[in-house]
Image (cartoon, rainbow, N blue to C red):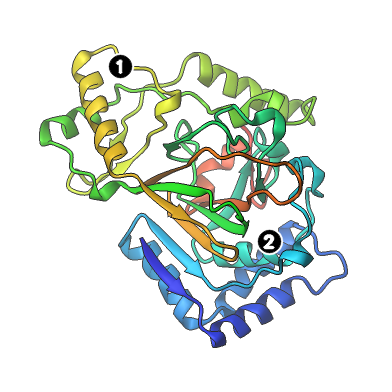
Amino acid sequence: MITYELTPEDIARVEAVVASLTAQEEPRLTTESLLSAALAAHELPPGLRRALTDFRLREPSGALMVRGFRIDDVTLGPTPRHWRDLAPAAVSREDAYLLVVSSLLGEVFGWATQQDGRLLHNVLPIAEHADEQLGSGSRELLWWHTEDAFHAHRADYVSLLCLRNPDKVATTYVNVSEVRVAAADKRLLFEEAFTIRPDNSHLPQHNASAPADDRTGLAFEAMAGMHEEPPPLAVLFGDPDDPYARLDPYFMEPPADPRHAAALGRLREAIEAAVREVILRPGDCLILDNYRSVHGRVPFRARFDGTDRWLKRVCITRNLRSSRAQRRGAENRVVYG
């Protein structure tokens, strides 16, 4: 993992950029504000821009940590009991920071079937999800995974901004390029012999009580189809000498061929042995290369009293056009199915 620490000069410049994006009386997340964030990203400090650009173009690591952004715990207010408690299009100072930093890596996007199609996700413990395999769970270990590994249009990067973490709950992380895989196993893992089902965050019960419109309903139907009959895929791809990965063990079944099953088992063991724990502090922005890393979260005891762990999350794509058939328009950032 690479770390970039904001200097006092960097912080002053970042604050000016963020202030320009939240100057309206009630900043809203719109197509125009996303464009403004993309333009404002070029006003970020040169050192930060260099670190982000190097991370994107050279792929030196599976994760980049940007530290030093200031979070005022009092101004922040209590951790919500549910992500629905926050206005869907409101943009806070922290949201603006996450958006502008992420914009240097690509385009922020969301899913019609996840958090009601919001682009900015709030990751916080929800009482009724405590024992579920969800980012909003708490007592349940969140297994390491590629974000939305089941989908062809999954994110290239995932940005996590820590707002609050008083209990020092660890995020788990593995740089997949550091995991050694035998040549024979690698050949098997490059074959389309594996399946990954959609994770539970894309289920209707974890979104609105009813689809917002017919297209959203069709998106949930598409997810149900992928759950029932997940298409075959390779879990390693790209350069055989330095492969990308696509994994979500909790939502995978053992392949029918024992050779593929054994190779997958050995890969899982190797990744499990390499898991690191990272404790995010308020203001930390952890940017994960979703092709070169997996991540998760250790279990913890939530209090649901307004003081629990609270992260902001966005998904970023380097190629928004790849999902054009699943979006309402060229400017729209929500993927349907």
Query: Is 11 or 164 nearer to us in this picture?
Result: 164
Identify the residue at horizontal 60%, vertical 27% (top origin).
Answer: 131
Which residue is rendered at x = 45% and y = 80% of the image?
47
Looking at the rendered structure, the kind of residue marked 2 is Asp
Percent of width and height locating residue 192: 30, 25
Q: Pick the residue in front: 255 or 43.
A: 255
Q: Position of residue 209 (x, y in %)?
A: 80, 25
Label drawn at residue 255: 1
Quarter of the figure with residue 261:
top left
Q: Please identify the quadrant where the C terminus is shown.
A: top right
50 is higher (above) or lower (below) than 290: below
Mark 2 vs 1: CB contact within 8 A = no
Instruction: Say if residue 190 shows up in the picture.
Output: no
What amino acid type should be assigned to the residue bearing mark 1?
Pro
Q: Which mark is drawn over residue 95?
A: 2
Secondary structure beneath label 1: loop
Q: Nearer the viewer, residue 214 or 161?
A: 161
- Residue drawn 73% across the image and 71% down it: 21
For mark 1, does the 10 Å Cα neighbourhood hold few (<14), some (14 to 19), or many (20 or more) residues?
some
Gap in angstroms between the C-alphas marked 2 and 1: 41 Å
User: Measured from the top left, where is residue 298 in percent x and y?
Assistant: 48, 41
Quarter of the image where the N terminus is located: bottom left
Along the polypeptide, which appears first: circle 2 or circle 1?
2
